[in-house]
Amino acid sequence: DAGITQSPRHKVTETGTPVTLRCHQTENHRYMYWYRQDPGHGLRLIHYSYGVKDTDKGEVSDGYSVSRSKTEDFLLTLESATSSQTSVYFCATTPRTGLQETQYFGPGTRLLVL
Amino acid sequence: AQSVTQLDSQVPVFEEAPVELRCNYSSSVSVYLFWYVQYPNQGLQLLLKYLSGSTLVKGINGFEAEFNKSQTSFHLRKPSVHISDTAEYFCAVSEIGGGSEKLVFGKGTKLTVNP
């Protein structure tokens, strides 16, 4: 399994505050993804990265930004958290481009916005 | 754009019984198909995937799935389940040549195996 860690694992914050979630991988995988998981919605792609400093939007990118300054780290920032962003956030990686590639998931971050 | 429908949100079964989790997809082009499993409080991990070739795909933990192009389905099966198979299962699809890195997930099926 790819070594993927996410921090923090749990966070409670207040509406309007900025929040940054970190994904760290030790496998030198090129592609990294951020998803959110909500009951009844499955997983939805927020943003993804196809290399250092190369990112693109996913299905539900409004209210989120990302940065990737080095291969191993992919940061997700909620500029001003809202209650609708309460969710479980998963990071995933793939070693190469290609839609046939398996995605490897981190353990998730549970975020509660009050 | 592709979409995935998992027909059952919850499936309760007894231990050692067979199970089938249903998945249908919609796409205007050829697709790759995946099943992922999520155990409680964990991330997702790949069970199996269909890329090409034989339509019957075998995965980990005794699961298998059959790709049916005419029915646009990719149902997951296991002949005899264990308590440890209790988890949420996600079907996912990506379009070949779709010009996107997007893997689209279904909403998930919660499998509960009872003793």
Image (cartoon, rainbow, N blue to C red):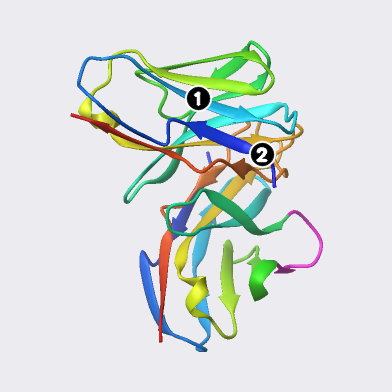
Q: Position of residue B12 (x, y in %)?
A: 37, 78
Q: Residue at x 57, y 64 (%)?
A: B73
Which amino acid, by three-letter code, is at mark 2?
Gly
Depth check: B33 or B37 in front? B37
Residue found at x 51% / y 43%: A107
Dots 1 and 2 on the same chain: yes
Horizontal placement of A22 versus B79: left or right?
A: left
User: Can residue B18 be seen by looking at this rendering?
Assistant: yes
Asked whether, in this view, residue B67 is left or right of residue A111, the answer is: right
Rendered location of residue B21, percent (x, y): 49, 71
Residue B111 belongs to the span the image colors magenta: no
Magenta residues span B51-59
Identify the image quadrant of residue B46.
bottom right
Classify mark 2: residues with Cα within 10 Å, few (<14), some (14-19) or many (20+): few
Find residue A49 and report its horizontal and vertical position in percent.
61, 22
User: CB atoms at circles 1 and 2 under 8 Å apart?
Assistant: no
Query: Which subunit holds the residue at mark 2?
Result: A
Q: Nearer the viewer, residue A99 or A114?
A: A114
For mark 2, give the secondary structure.
Answer: loop
In depth, the one of B82 and A38 nearer the eye is B82
Q: Residues within 10 Å of mark 1 (few under 14, many from 20)?
A: some
Q: Is residue B54 magenta?
A: yes
Q: Position of residue B25 (x, y in %)?
A: 53, 55
- Mark 1 → mark 2, Cα distance in angstroms: 14 Å
Residue pictured at 68% horizontal, 50% vertical = B32
On residue A3, the disc is 2
Q: Which is nearer the N-term, disc 1 or disc 2?
A: 2
Q: Quadrant of the C terminus of chain B?
A: bottom left
Disc 1 designates what residue?
Answer: A22
Chain designation of label 1: A
